[in-house]
Amino acid sequence: MSEIFPLFILLLILCMIISIVWWSYRNGISPMPTSRKVKEALLRMAPKDLEGTLYDLGSGWGTLVIPLAKRYPQCQVIGVESSPIPYSISYFRKNPNNLRLLREDFFAISLENATMIACYLYPGAMLKLRDKFEEELHTGAWVISHTFAVPDWKPLQTVTVNDLYHTKIYLYQIGKHHG
Ligand SMILES: C[S@@+](CC[C@H](N)C(=O)[O-])C[C@H]1O[C@@H](n2cnc3c(N)ncnc32)[C@H](O)[C@@H]1O
């Protein structure tokens, strides 16, 4: 029994690693969390008074969506993540009551009720999301994205974070992004 237990743990860790790698390949991006500096800058930059429903598309381990839910206790905050291991870890973290986590593909859900969308994704997803945003988001809804911009949209504000990568954060508002 005492010999089987470490083997079981090893197998479990191996399965978890395989799952993370497989879903990273499938989604086109790993569950790399937003860094502390970028998260703080993003929370400072996001609009102060928001009501309604906020989304983190690809919420990973919960690194960004949990602070977002704490920052906007009056809002319903929804994290959408398809990769099972990061999703499960975020699910079992100490989550505020206004946070809901969905294990889904964010391209398959409606964003019509969104007041603000936050994302840290990759260029291909931003291109595909641009069309979805233009179709589904209402005038006045906000989009905040770091590292990758929404192609062809003009941000209302851009902030460069004082980190190793000079990460850029882009803030857009629907109806005001075409310049
Ligand atoms: C770079 S991580 C960002 C995690 C988190 N938002 C943060 O800032 O810490 C991107 C996440 O998006 C998820 N993702 C990518 N495409 C997705 C899709 N179509 N549906 C759901 N999740 C997706 C990935 O699995 C990954 O966990």
Image: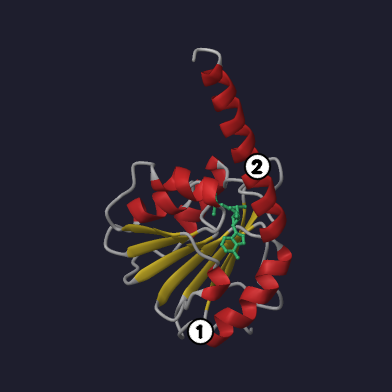
For this rendering, which residue is in front, 116 or 18? Answer: 18
- Screen quadrant of the C terminus: bottom right
Of the numbered discs 1 and 2, the one sitting upstream in the chain is 1
Residue under label 1, please give it.
Answer: 136
Query: For disc 2, does the CB lie below 8 Å from ligand 1?
Result: no
What scheme was used to colour the molecule? secondary structure
Judged from the image, the secondary structure of the residue bearing numbered disc 1 is: helix
Pair 1/2: label in front: 1
Which residue sits at x=37%, y=62%?
77
The residue lying furthest to the front in this view is 1
Residue type at numbered disc 1 = Glu
Look at the picture and state if 48 lies above or below 14.
below
Judge the density around disc 1: few (<14), some (14-19), many (≥20) Cα neighbours within 10 Å: some
**Quick check: can you spot residue 153?**
yes
Residue under label 2, please give it.
Answer: 163
Which residue sits at x=49%, y=68%?
117
Query: For disc 1, does the CB lie below 8 Å from ligand 1?
Result: no
CA separation in Å, label 1 and label 2:
34 Å
Quarter-of-image position of residue 108:
bottom right
**Quick check: can you spot residue 167?**
no
Quadrant in which ligand 1 is drawn: bottom right
Look at the picture and state if 106 lies above or below 137.
above
Q: Residue 102 in the image: x percent, y percent?
A: 43, 61
Which residue sits at x=33%, y=66%?
49
Which residue sits at x=71%, y=78%?
152
Look at the picture and state if 15 lies above or below 128.
above
Judge the density around disc 2: few (<14), some (14-19), many (≥20) Cα neighbours within 10 Å: few
Q: Residue 163 in the image: x percent, y percent?
A: 65, 42
Residue type at numbered disc 2 = Asp
Look at the picture and state if 124 lies above or below 160.
below
For this rendering, which residue is in front, 158 or 17? Answer: 17
